[in-house]
Amino acid sequence: MRTPALRFAASLATGLALALPVAPAQPSPSPRPPLRSQVFEWSKLAPRVTPNGERRDVANHPTPTLAVFESHITTLNPGRSSHAPHRHPQEELIIVKEGTLEATIPGEVHRAGAGSILLFTSNDLHGMRNAGDAPLTYYVIRMITAATPKA
């Protein structure tokens, strides 16, 4: 038979167990170190084949002033899109290296060739596709700051 003191102790232990944080099954990855000034050489960026072309990852780290600097390079086969039109909270800059890009930016379709720069601001619906008959390659630069809205 449990005494009132024993019932109280059991209740207290159960409450504490529920209130304490549970340790994750696996340790969390350590934060990535901030990027410093450097050169990202094209020849050292390994291409990863995708269903629509290929992708080269450049960086995905904080910097001294950005919460995250993410960059990759996409090559799309003729007529292909990297994905359906979408929106995201971070700003995104696209620089066309080669080919003909067709971009939908808040409802309007624009064509952009080599050397063109596109800016997608926070939460604007946008989409891109290769509108040419040769590969389209473009650089993607995403910047997340303290002012970037949460997803």
Image (tube, rainbow, N blue to C red):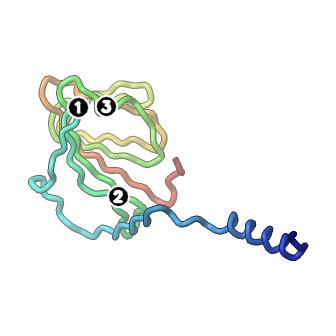
> Which is more N-terminal, label 2 or label 3?
2
Amino acid type at image mark 1: Pro
Q: CA distance from mark 3 to mark 2?
A: 21 Å
- Residue 15 vs 103, above or below: the answer is below
Q: Residue at x 14, y 31 (%)?
A: 135
Q: Position of residue 19 (x, y in %)?
A: 69, 66
Q: Residue at x 50, y 60 (%)?
A: 146
Q: In this image, 28 relative to 82: left or right?
A: right
Name the mark nearer the viewer: 1 or 2: 1
Q: CA distance from mark 1 to mark 3?
A: 15 Å
Amino acid type at image mark 3: Met
Q: Give the labeled residue for mark 2.
A: 69
Q: Residue at x 45, y 37 (%)?
A: 87
Name the mark nearer the viewer: 1 or 3: 1
Q: Give the structural element (helix, strand or loop) at label 1.
A: loop
Q: Give the labeled residue for mark 3.
A: 128
Q: Residue at x 73, y 66 (%)?
A: 14
